[in-house]
Image (tube, helix red, strand yellow):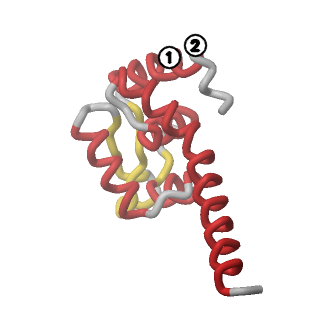
Amino acid sequence: MTDVHQSAAIQDAVDGVLEAISSARRPERRLNAALAEVDLKADQWRILQTISHTPGVLMGELAESLVIPAASLTRIVDDLADRGLLFRRPAPDDKRKAGVYLSRLGGERLARATAIITSRGIAGD
């Protein structure tokens, strides 16, 4: 194979990878566009959704279940707490750990967000 053909083959492979990445991100872009109406992003919605199903979930468990780095999760949870959508409480069995809970406002926002994405058929993407 000549250098020109090899270079073209490499470029075709790179183009294929970039297209695959772009295709994989489309559903999340649709989700983020819908969630913007209720001032949420996909990761924030996923966190609220998980907390609604497992009230008091510990931060480490939440990070593991959502596959979000702990530092990123802490930043997102801090933002959601500052906005009054969730709150932390010390874990009953270990005061060094904190459980995360939805606030009433968080539950209302989650319900509105879920209704929007369901009505647009995005939930199954």
Report whether 40 appears left or right of 54.
left
Amino acid on which the number 2 mark rests in the picture: Ser
Tell me if residue 86 comes above or below residue 62 in the rendering. Answer: above
| Residue bearing the label numbered 2 | 119
Foreground residue among 13 and 72: 13
| Residue bearing the label numbered 1 | 116
Q: CA distance from mark 1 to mark 2?
A: 5 Å
Amino acid on which the number 1 mark rests in the picture: Ile
Mark 1 and mark 2 in contact? Answer it, CB < 8 Å. yes
Foreground residue among 83 and 37: 37
Tell me if residue 27 comes above or below residue 5 in the rendering. Answer: above
Q: Position of residue 108 (x, y in %)?
A: 40, 18
Image quadrant assignment for residue 32: top left
Q: Position of residue 113 (x, y in %)?
A: 46, 22
Q: Quadrant of the C terminus?
A: top right
Q: Residue at x 53, y 39 (%)?
A: 28
